[in-house]
Image (cartoon, coloured by chain):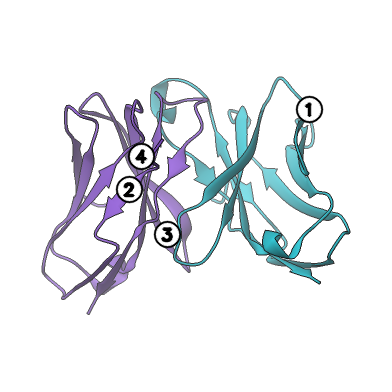
Chain colours: A purple, B cyan
Amino acid sequence: KAGVTQTPRYLIKTRGQQVTLSCSPISGHRSVSWYQQTPGQGLQFLFEYFSETQRNKGNFPGRFSGRQFSNSRSEMNVSTLELGDSALYLCASSLASGRDTQYFGPGTRLTVL
Amino acid sequence: DQQVKQNSPSLSVQEGRISILNCDYTNSMFDYFLWYKKYPAEGPTFLISISSIKDKNEDGRFTVFLNKSAKHLSLHIVPSQPGDSAVYFCAASPGIGGTSYGKLTFGQGTILTVHP
């Protein structure tokens, strides 16, 4: 079974631009969670989607948003990019949530100049 | 407020010996715990998990112990191999429902180096 895939793997943007990252979950998985990893803050939860609905959200500004499609694929969008948004963005999929194990994709490395 | 803590930033072990990685948590609502292994520029790879109704779970060379009264868990790797060298994260979830959906809270990670 194919794992979680994320595109693109690397991205360079400038301040003020916006960016869209994509995540395809493991087949049959309906929950997709997004995380941001930075050297200073570690791995931090952004939000979770299930059946096209956002069920949970972390402590990030409204510039960070996401959505999920009917095939469970998910996108996250960051508008008005800031230097501090440079990070590894990871998505994880699971069957439903709660005690289901989350399996991570390889991540998208975003650099904001 | 860091709810999951890995107090050892790094650990160095000889090949063949035991590696013990530790993790403490403060949130009593956490009832499901996981360990992940991560290489640079890659996503975390799931290793092993444990539910709060258990105090031990084994999978091959990996064993996780949970001490709920102390709010402490540990990952034992026996025997350690050079290929185990990576960053290890513990993560916790409050279980099903409410504000817990899809949210794992991670520790800061421990860099494990296994020397040949």
Residue type marked 1: Asp
Q: Secondary structure at mark 1?
A: loop
**Circle 4: residue type:** Ser
> Both on one chain, marks 2 and 3?
yes
Among all residues in the image, which is located at the extreme left? A17
Amino acid type shown at disc 2: Thr
Amino acid identity at mark 3: Gln
What is the secondary structure assignment of the residue under circle 4? Answer: strand
B47 horizontally vs A105: left or right: right
Q: CA distance from mark 2 to mark 3?
A: 17 Å
| Residue A28, quarter of the rendered image | top left
Position of A85 relative to A105 (above/below): below
Q: CA distance from mark 2 to mark 1?
A: 34 Å
Q: Secondary structure at mark 2?
A: strand
Point out residue B111 in the picture as x, y percentages from the top left corner: 66, 65
Name the residue carrying label 3.
A37
Which residue lies under the disc numbered 4? A33
Query: Mark 4, mark 2: which one is toward the viewer?
Result: 2
Residue displayed at 76% across by 44% down: B74
